[in-house]
Image (tube, coloured by chain):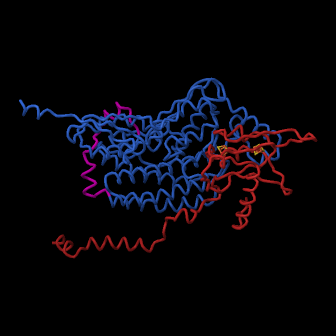
Chain colours: A red, B blue
């Protein structure tokens, strides 16, 4: 008897529509990705940056630890001896197309220089653009610093 | 004469995959069909082969951890854990209690994430799309937690030989507590949608039979084995980390069909949640990394201030650590079954040989046995209940 009642009055359909209606007013859990960024957590491992001193000189001392520990061998460093016997970093490159964002370089660095940033927009149309050098890495630091200050966070 | 010829069954061989959406990756199945009935299924694996085991021979022990993420990519933290436990066995290092608890939390959350993908795709293959959307919603929360604690959603590389890389932030515990409290309700929701669903029952009961003897003979493990009535779970029978401190049940079902395995995994979801809840409650304070100088990287603060730590860091990174000569095997109860790492060391900073016992690979071997005599349409249900991940099979 109840079954016939249910069939005639379409109760189940209305039940189903009720659930749909309920979800209509719930908080949305999806993001329109290319137009709006998904939120990320502070620990997110994105494109690296290298910290600089107050005077703009890089904090990196060219110790090769990050190059050594990198599992995908994507960091390339060349150092040289300066006129006063100091260490110069001739080349510091990270090949982002090889990088797996494991964070090992950050973990290895003994002077708090290289860090994982929060930028994950790395698509590009040419491979050459994936190789970033010390200049870009230092600029990344400025960007990350500005972003962090805007949010009131510490880097 | 003509009539007789017509009666002789003609076997048709078709390919399923490697691009078929319900083969869960790049699995190619060569299916021999008699009409619509399956006579023989031959899995053809290797499309995702990346030579992980060989790569291990050219990486230091430390550098291999990110590669383990890419085995069973649905539960990277279990793979990290299995590998690190195997290497730790060489050294016999003592892991701090807090690190052990964090490892359990991560491993069980990984089980939740992996089983959620299983229920989502398994149901989607059979035709229940709603479950897919709900399960992925919850999985996203688990992945958010992973991102909060480890920095990445899926390739976490967070567990280290000797502990865990860093302590989880406060936010992680908040997210985890909320999730654990609500999770039973979510499982109720999936069960509401499926357990008594007529179509679901018709598609799963009596499909893909596997009895206890066969399950054992084929060497299966995990839910596949427990769904056949064998009560075996490494977490209880050979406890690692600190699983002996938790109260949990090992669900088993005697029937050995797809529905039984569904029930086992649903209960496992609840049990995993229970373990996480207990671990969060009893989480001890303390260090997260052992201070054993043979394997532990000195902390950053130490390195900035103390010469000895700096030297040790340079030594550990440039030379790596060298386990004594010998071999070791450690298996853990990963979401898919027994995941084991067998390592042979020649006393160098890299393994001489590393063999991965991937649960999916062994479980896939039983596919032919399970599928014979069923309809072709049931094959997707049987692949789904097998719960294979190709990253782990092809390695
Ligand atoms: S994140 Fe990993 S792969 Fe990328 S540069 Fe650093 S160490 Fe290398
Ligand atoms: S580890 Fe740090 S200091 Fe050493 S080379 Fe890399 S970025 Fe520079």
Q: Residue at x 38, y 34 (%)?
A: B44
- Say which of B155 and B169 sits in front: B155
- Say which of B324 and B35 sits in front: B35
Quadrant of the picture in which ligand 2 is shown: top right
Residue B239, position as x, y percentages in the image: 50, 39
Looking at the image, the residue that sits furthest to the right is: A84
Image position of A81 (left or right of A145): right
Image quadrant containing the N terminus of chain B: top left
Image position of B191 (left or right of A44): left
- Say which of A53 and B296 sits in front: A53
Total residue callouts: 0
Residue B268 visible to an observer of this rendering: yes
Looking at the image, the residue that sits furthest to the bottom is: A9
Residue B288 visible to an observer of this rendering: no
Q: Quadrant of residue A61?
A: top right
Residue B146, position as x, y percentages in the image: 56, 53
Relative to residue B6, is residue B193 depicted above or below?
below
Q: Quadrant of residue B323?
A: top right
State yes or no: residue B197 in magenta: yes
State yes or no: residue B208 in magenta: yes
Q: Residue at x 37, y 71 (%)?
A: A20
Magenta-colored span:
B194-221
Residue B81, position as x, y percentages in the image: 56, 41
Residue B320, position as x, y percentages in the image: 69, 33
């Amino acid at each position: 008897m109840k079954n016939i009642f249910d069939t005639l009055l379409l109760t189940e359909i209305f039940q189903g529509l009720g659930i749909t209606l309920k979800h209509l007013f719930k908080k949305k859990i999806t993001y329109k990705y290319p137009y709006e960024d998904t939120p990320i957590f502070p620990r997110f491992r994105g494109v690296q940056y290298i910290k600089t001193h107050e005077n703009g000189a890089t904090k990196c001392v060219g110790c090769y630890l990050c190059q050594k520990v990198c599992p995908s061998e994507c960091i390339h460093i060349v150092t040289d001896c300066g006129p006063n016997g100091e260490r110069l970093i001739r080349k510091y490159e990270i090949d982002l197309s090889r990088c797996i964002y494991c964070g090992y370089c950050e973990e290895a660095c003994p002077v708090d220089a290289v860090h994982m940033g929060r930028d994950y927009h790395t698509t590009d149309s040419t491979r050459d653009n994936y190789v970033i050098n010390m200049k870009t890495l230092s600029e990344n630091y400025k960007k990350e610093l500005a972003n962090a200050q805007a949010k009131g966070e510490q880097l | 004469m003509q009539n007789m010829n017509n009666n002789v069954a003609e076997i048709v061989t078709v390919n399923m995959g490697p691009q078929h959406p319900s083969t869960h990756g790049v699995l190619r199945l060569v299916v021999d069909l008699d009409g619509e009935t399956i006579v023989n299924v031959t899995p053809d694996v290797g499309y995702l082969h990346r030579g992980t085991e060989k790569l291990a021979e050219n990486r230091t022990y430390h550098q291999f951890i990110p590669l383990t993420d890419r085995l069973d990519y649905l539960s990277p933290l279990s793979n990290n854990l299995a590998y690190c436990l195997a290497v730790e066995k060489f050294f016999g290092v003592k892991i701090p209690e807090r690190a052990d608890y964090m490892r359990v939390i991560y491993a069980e959350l990984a089980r939740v994430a992996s089983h959620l993908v299983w229920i989502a795709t398994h149901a989607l293959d059979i035709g229940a799309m709603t479950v897919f959307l709900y399960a992925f919603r919850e999985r996203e929360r688990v992945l958010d937690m992973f991102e909060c604690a480890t920095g990445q959603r899926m390739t976490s590389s967070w567990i280290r030989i000797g502990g865990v890389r860093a302590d989880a932030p406060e936010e992680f515990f908040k997210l985890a507590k909320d999730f654990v409290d609500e999770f039973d309700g979510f499982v109720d929701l999936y069960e509401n949608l499926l357990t008594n669903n007529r179509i679901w029952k018709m598609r799963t009961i009596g499909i893909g039979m596997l009895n206890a003897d066969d399950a054992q003979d084929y060497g299966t493990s995990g839910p596949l084995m427990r769904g056949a009535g064998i009560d075996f779970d490494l977490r209880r029978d050979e406890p690692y980390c600190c699983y002996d401190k938790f109260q949990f049940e090992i669900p088993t079902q005697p029937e050995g069909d797809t529905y039984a395995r569904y029930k086992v995994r649903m209960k496992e979801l609840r049990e995993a949640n229970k373990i996480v809840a207990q671990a969060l409650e009893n989480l001890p304070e303390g260090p997260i990394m052992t201070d054993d100088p043979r394997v532990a990287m000195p902390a950053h603060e130490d390195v900035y201030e103390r010469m000895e730590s700096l030297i040790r860091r340079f030594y550990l990174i440039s030379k790596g650590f060298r386990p004594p000569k010998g071999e070791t095997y450690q298996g853990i109860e990963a979401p898919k079954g027994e995941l084991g790492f067998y390592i042979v060391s020649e006393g160098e900073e890299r393994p001489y040989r590393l063999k991965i016992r991937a649960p999916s690979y062994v479980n896939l071997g039983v596919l032919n046995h399970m599928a014979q005599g069923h309809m072709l349409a049931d094959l997707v249900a049987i692949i789904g209940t097998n719960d294979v991940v190709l990253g782990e099979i092809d390695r």
